[in-house]
Image (cartoon, helix red, strand yellow):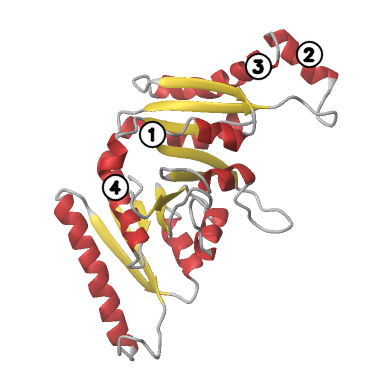
Amino acid sequence: MTRPITAGVDGSQESLAALAWAAREAVRREAPLRVVHAWRFQPQDTAGVGDRDAQERSVRDAVAEYVRTVTERHPGLTVDTDVREADDAVAALLAAGADAEALVLGSRGHGAVVGFLLGSVGQRVIAEATRPVVLVRDGDEAATEAAGREVVVGQQGEPEDSADVIGFAFEAAAARDATVRAVRAWTLPTVFTYSPGSMALADEAGGLEQYERKALGEALGPWRERFPDVPVIEHVEMGSAGQVLLSVAGGAQLVVVGRRARRTAVGARIGSVAHGVLHHADCPVAVVPHT
């Protein structure tokens, strides 16, 4: 069964941009589209709709109009709606996205300094989701995608650490006939991470940079075999992972980053790399949870 592309909408311009992106992605992947709206009863509704049934009708009519716009643009697209009353929008979105190929949300805006403006709902959904979450900013359009022919993905750790992240990037690239630019950033070992054993491995590989190139190649190997028609560019550079990713993402349609799925003592977190990319990327960003 093909997983749906799920879009969370609330009527804002940024959520409608996310819906439009999700519809295009569903068409590319030949997947169904699910449109989710979580609403909360407002006894003193400013529009004068004061009873629950009337408010629900108003919400459903609005969602139906969003869907109509999408189906006019993509006549063959299968679309279903999930309109639910919920006190906790985060819980509703997480539940709706649990079986999705990706949950697509809108960002409030973008600027030279602040990048994606994530509200508390967006931050919590990204931090707690078990499936990939894609952030799309207001103003994102189909025309802007045509200018970018790469899917940029960050790879860290061992191959098993980044398998889900790289897999999502290859699938996205295959769906849009794009190139995968796989990025591995590295830094000189500190006195706390240095060990004779680790340095011996680096020496065997021909130095630290060659060791990092070998590690990236090993992580990409299975996905190159699975997607032989997807061109791949391997990019290894010394520096901060977030900064290196952003430095090569100018021509990207999509940037894919990972997030540790396990919870810490302070709860679920987005992670420093994902957080940095979200705050400065010019294109949609997919945050993929991994073990």
Front: mark 4 or 1? 4
Residue 278 appears anywhere in the view: yes
**Is 232 situated left or right of 17 in this image?**
right
How far apart, in angstroms, are the residues tagged by discs 2 and 3?
13 Å
Res. 200 mark: 2
> Whole-percent x and y of residue 274?
56, 44
Residue identified by numbered label 1:
171
Q: Distance between the residues labelled 4 and 2?
A: 49 Å
Q: Give the mark, 3 or 4, whose residue is nearer the N terminus.
A: 4
Pointers 2 and 3 in contact (C-beta within 8 Å): no
Q: Nearer the viewer, residue 161 or 116?
A: 116
Up/down of 133 relative to 66, above or below: above
Q: Which of marks 1 and 2 is nearer the N terminus?
A: 1
Position in image of residue 108 (x %, y %) = 43, 60
Q: How far apart are marks 1 and 3 (CA)?
A: 28 Å
Q: Which of marks 2 and 3 is in front?
A: 3
